[in-house]
Amino acid sequence: MKKKLLTVIPTIILVATPLAIGVSPADAAPKANSQKVVAKAETRPTLRLGSQSSYVKELQQILKNAKYNVTVDGVFGPKTESAVKQFQTDHNLSADGIVGSATWNALDQNKVERQQFTVNTAIALGQKKLSNNIIFSGDGRLLKDSKKQSYYRFKAANKDWIEQGGTGTIGWYHIYKDGRVVAE
């Protein structure tokens, strides 16, 4: 009898615990899961000249991957500030050199867009539209126009003109993800 009683008591305690605190067993699991999701949502700090942290390092790596000239060292110095201002200008943000929520969001979106719309894809679209005889060159930055549409800016050169000793330059073009090629 004592053995059965000991076996039953822990079961009753486990079932009764959520009820004792006013939560049904069915409601207890979702609350724990939603707390985990909330804990994962991280707010990044505002960064500016003089900041030093792993967040600065993350910022610098994102900028470097987006073809901005920065050193990944975790120190927000003049070179990082300059790259941030250029990024902000390129993405129609206030170019104050301070990385707040708006800049963190331009950065995150740029990172995803660069994975979906690569430089090589843009070049292929440009050659399809203009000619396979065109060579494109640029810094590889994904930019935004005034309507917040992403594009790559390339200098286009004609292979035949280059082979004949000229520069081959025919102009500058914006190549969009939807295949539009717009002369500057």
Image: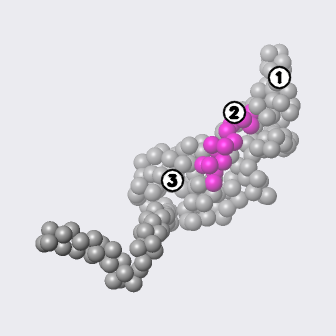
Is 159 positioned to the left or the right of 60 in the image? right
Front disc: 1 or 2: 2
Report if residue 120 lies within the magenta region: yes
> Where residue 87 appears, x then y in whole percent?
63, 53
Please report the residue visible at 69 percent of the width from the left and 55 percent of the height from the top.
91
Q: CA distance from mark 2 to mark 3?
A: 24 Å
Q: Nearer the viewer, residue 57 or 4?
A: 4
Query: Which residue lies under the disc numbered 3?
Result: 59
Give SS at disc 1: loop
Q: Quadrant of residue 173?
A: top right
> Where residue 45 appears, x then y in whole percent?
48, 65
Query: Which residue lies under the disc numbered 2?
Result: 120
Q: Nearer the viewer, residue 13 or 85?
A: 13
Front disc: 2 or 3: 2
> Where residue 155 appears, x then y in whole percent?
77, 35
Q: Which residues are magenta?
A: 109-123
Q: Classify mark 1: residues with Cα within 10 Å, few (<14), some (14-19) or many (20+).
A: some
